[in-house]
Amino acid sequence: MAISLVDIFAARKNIMDLVIRTPLVQSPDLSKLAQTQVYLKIETYQKTGSFKLRGATNAIARVKPGQAVITASTGNHGRALAYAASQHNIQANICLSNLVPGNKVEAIKASGANLFIHGDSQDDALDYAITLAQREHMALIPPFDHPDVIAGQGTIGLEIIEQLPETATIVIPLSGGGLLAGIAMAVKSIKPQITIIGVTMDQGCAMHTSLQAGHPVNVTEQPTLADSLGGGIGINNKYTFALVQKYCDTTILVDEPAIAQAIVHTYMVEREIIEGAAAVGIAALFSGQLDQYTQNGPMVLLLTGKNIDMHTHAKLIAGTSRIST
Ligand SMILES: *Cc1c(COP(=O)(O)O)cnc(C)c1O
């Protein structure tokens, strides 16, 4: 494998200045529900509102001086890359599909990056980024299938083990799998007995479908509250598919009403604003699908991002919109 624990420790040094060590806090309410200690790793406190700042910052630290960078992103990676690039005086170019919500488009624009809106899926936007990267000699930093990105996300795994050595289970929102691959590699290299669970929405879940097939497959992207989990894993996936196949103990699917309920619960009870992608772990807990793991000991759920459209959030809280995006 082209990436190892050493790369994750190196990433931790590279990202120290821009990325915070996020709190891991016990949720009394969820602990009571699960009858075990449930902890929340609150990545929403990162500067761009999601953990994606870790991988983007690590990748930017390794770009040649003066070279521009380009990516395609469902929003959070683009936003993180734009911010990390601006901190290093590097020009960022971000390709988005028409599915990306307006609040995320505005945030990326405000960061000073060049913006390209292309196609109706994350895969279209990525194809466009690849074309531009070759033509303009830019460094392509994709949102998940890149060793520096995976290593950056893996720093979360190091923190969890230090903050709660007795962790038994880590529940991770799963899309392209950079987050899960990085954390799982860090964690399983140090404590192989920890169980790693990937959670995703039941509509258009590319990694789950690919794992079932035994190879990367295309899925049709669907509108979902968990918009940051949309998009394929790439038919020519180089890193994350093999790593997730190796390290992920199981995958769990949750539906749209469960994601909506988890966003509302997290606001009303935990008093945190999270986006749909970050809500899938709590949704899985509510659905009973984590019951068989709670007896093993403390469980960590990742709150991965908070960049939800606030009008959507307000409607969910008011109960006027349970599932529409
Ligand atoms: C990108 C993202 C994920 C999933 O990460 P992958 O590396 O693509 O699996 C989860 N939650 C949020 C908020 C994200 O932005």
Image: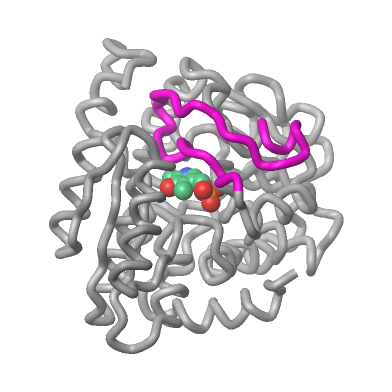
Residue 205 higher or lower than 185, as above or below: above
The spot of residue 259 in percent (x, y) is 48, 24
Query: Residue at the spot x=31%, y=67% of the render?
Result: 135
Q: Nearer the viewer, residue 318 or 73?
A: 73
Give the farthest residue toward the top.
Answer: 320
Left or right: 262 as drawn, with respect to 247: left
The spot of residue 167 in percent (x, y) is 73, 54
The answer to whether one can see residue 303 in this image is no
Residue 90 higher or lower than 271, as above or below: below
| Magenta segment includes 210 | yes
Q: Write the start and end of the magenta stretch as one range.
A: 209-235
Query: Residue at the spot x=36%, y=74% of the render?
Result: 18
| Quadrant containing the N terminus in the rendered view | bottom right
Left or right: 103 as drawn, with respect to 132: left
Asked which colour scheme the image uses, the reply is one colour
The spot of residue 231 in percent (x, y) is 47, 38
| Quadrant containing the C terminus in the rendered view | top left
Query: Residue at the spot x=30%, y=40% of the render?
Result: 97
| Magenta segment includes 185 | no
Left or right: 173 as drawn, with respect to 43: right
